Amino acid sequence: MTDDAPQLRASDADRDRVADILRDALAEGRLDMAEFEERLEAAYRARTYAELAPLTGDLPASGAAVPAVSLHKDPAGSGSWAERVVGGDGSSAWAVAVMSGFQRKGRWTAPKRFRSFVFWGGGEIDLREAYFADREVEIECVAIMGGVQVIVEPGVEVVVRGIGVMGGFDHREEGVPGEPGAPRVIVTGFAFWGGVGVERKLTKAERLRQKEERARLKDERRRERLERRSERHQLHAARREERWEDRERRRDGNGPAS
């Protein structure tokens, strides 16, 4: 790398890569919206690497060398359903909470049948990031004066077959078709003076992706506004130049007679 590398002209691809880094920083909370907008506008106005480098210099993986603004992003895993139906026995087959609580969440393997029991307590069974031992898994919940919450992500088919006595099972997520290859979750059991809820939520990664997409769309709209503003400035400048040239011609007697 030569010493004059910072003065090299930046390309549109370089500016777009810096914008990607800034969007990631916004989504991760490293930049607030005001800082993001200020840096993004500076990125699209930048002409050289020297102008781009400070915009990402305090962000992770931005690199020390100036041309490192042309960063690549590590590819994310495909997260396909085929990868998440892994077979086997599951990493946890049961959970009990007596006057207490339990959680099953994160990267765990849900068995073909998972049993849970709560008495004067609560439990959370979060399948959003889970792997599955089978394409059809049963979550059995017994809630006595307590509650269990089952959380799935969009794309998973849910069937609820539980019985409630002075309590109940949540059926709101039933009837939503599953995606091809996605597992089927059957919620069964018994609730007495308690309840079993079923909730559909996005994963953290999907929420981050949607936040990035909103930032990208806002970025595109802002860039379009900047481009339109630049075009208007250029048009006004051209018109001023034409008027100036016309006045010069008139002054020299070369213009049309008044």
Image (cartoon, rainbow, N blue to C red):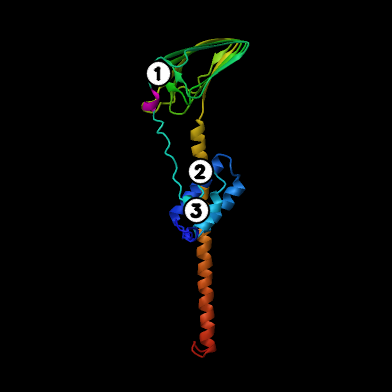
Q: Is residue 82 magenta?
A: yes
The magenta region covers 81-85
Q: Residue at left 43%, top 28%?
A: 155
N-terminal of the pair, mark 3 or mark 2, is: 2
Lower position in the chain sequence, tag 3 or tag 1? 3
Q: Does dot 2 land on a helix, a strand or a loop?
A: loop
Nearest to viewer (mark 3 / mark 1): 3
Relative height, residue 157 to residue 145 (above, below): below
Circle 2 sits on which residue?
A: 61
The image quarter in which residue 148 lies: top right
Which of the labelled discs sits on residue 66, or is there none? 3
Q: Quadrant of the N terminus?
A: bottom left
* Residue at x 50% of width, y 72% of height: 238
In this view, the residue in front, 61 or 170, is 61
Relative image position of residue 122 (x, y in whole percent): 59, 15
Residue drawn at point x = 55 percent, y = 14 percent: 168
Amino acid type of the residue tagged 2 in the rendering:
Ala
Q: Between marks 2 and 1, how big is the CA–CA gap? A: 37 Å
